[in-house]
Amino acid sequence: MSNESVVIRTARVILTGLQEEDAPRLASYRQHPEVARYQSWESYSEPEARELIASMQKSDPWSLDSWYQFGLRLAEDGCLIGDIGIRRKQNGPSYDAEVGYSLDPTYQKQGYMREALLAILSWAARQLHIRRFTASLDPRNVASARLLIALGFRLEASYRQSQWFKGAWADDDVYVLLEEEIR
């Protein structure tokens, strides 16, 4: 399946595959200090954005054990405001998925990511047959933890100083949502 074949719509947002013309916007919000703070990158260049987009155009959300990044766009004009990644894994007779996301600070605290995550979780449960969703985050990322809890995720594990992250040991909280708990 092509990444262009998946389009998920809500009242205010559209989730689609990333396109070449998204590179400047993707690099712009991903290099913002508020966005990069809890992500694996320090800065994010346009060539890095182009490389990510090129790799996503060769992939799809059905792939196992690799991330697939959806572009999060405003429904009114198609402007890219964020992205949501999903990594699907085989788990016995079913599938699990890890999710991750980033959002342009201009559009934070307006419900866009909540709306988009709910849509992608619902879609993935149906289309990708995901039984269990996880999200891993730094416990200092309070806004992200609140978002996950609002969507029904619960804290399943807290790992102290478990990851070497940006030059220091960092804690890792893992949140879980089962398919039947999506609300």
Image: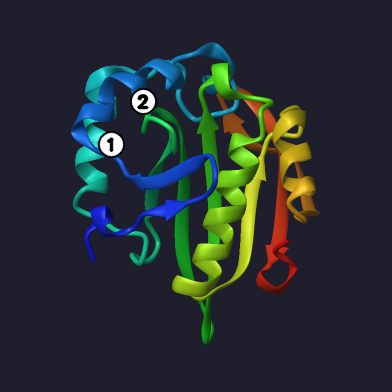
Q: Which residue is mark 1?
A: 52
Density class for disc 2 (Cα within 10 Å; few <14, some 14-19, many ≥20) is many
Residue 61 placement, left or right of 4 = right
- Helix, strand or loop status at disc 1: helix
Decide if residue 90 is in sight here: no
Q: Residue at x 57, y 23 (%)?
A: 107
View extreme (top): residue: 33
Counting the numbered discs, the total is 2
Which percent across, then down, holds residue 78? 36, 33
Give amino acid for label 1: Leu
Q: Residue at x 75, y 27 (%)?
A: 140
Residue 120 placement, left or right of 28 = right
Decide if residue 94 is in sight here: yes
Q: Which residue is mark 2?
A: 26
Residue 18 placement, left or right of 77 = left
Which percent across, then down, holds residue 6? 33, 58
Density class for disc 1 (Cα within 10 Å; few <14, some 14-19, many ≥20) is some
Query: Which mark is drawn over residue 179?
Result: none
Which percent across, then down, holds residue 33? 54, 12
Q: Residue at x 58, y 48 (%)?
A: 117
The quadrant in which the N terminus is found is bottom left
Give the alpha-carbon distance from disc 1 to disc 2, as whole Å: 10 Å
Give amino acid for label 2: Leu
Residue 134 placement, left or right of 54 = right
- Helix, strand or loop status at disc 2: helix
Asked if the residue at tag 2 contacts the one at tag 1, i.e. Cβ–Cβ closer than 8 Å, the answer is: yes
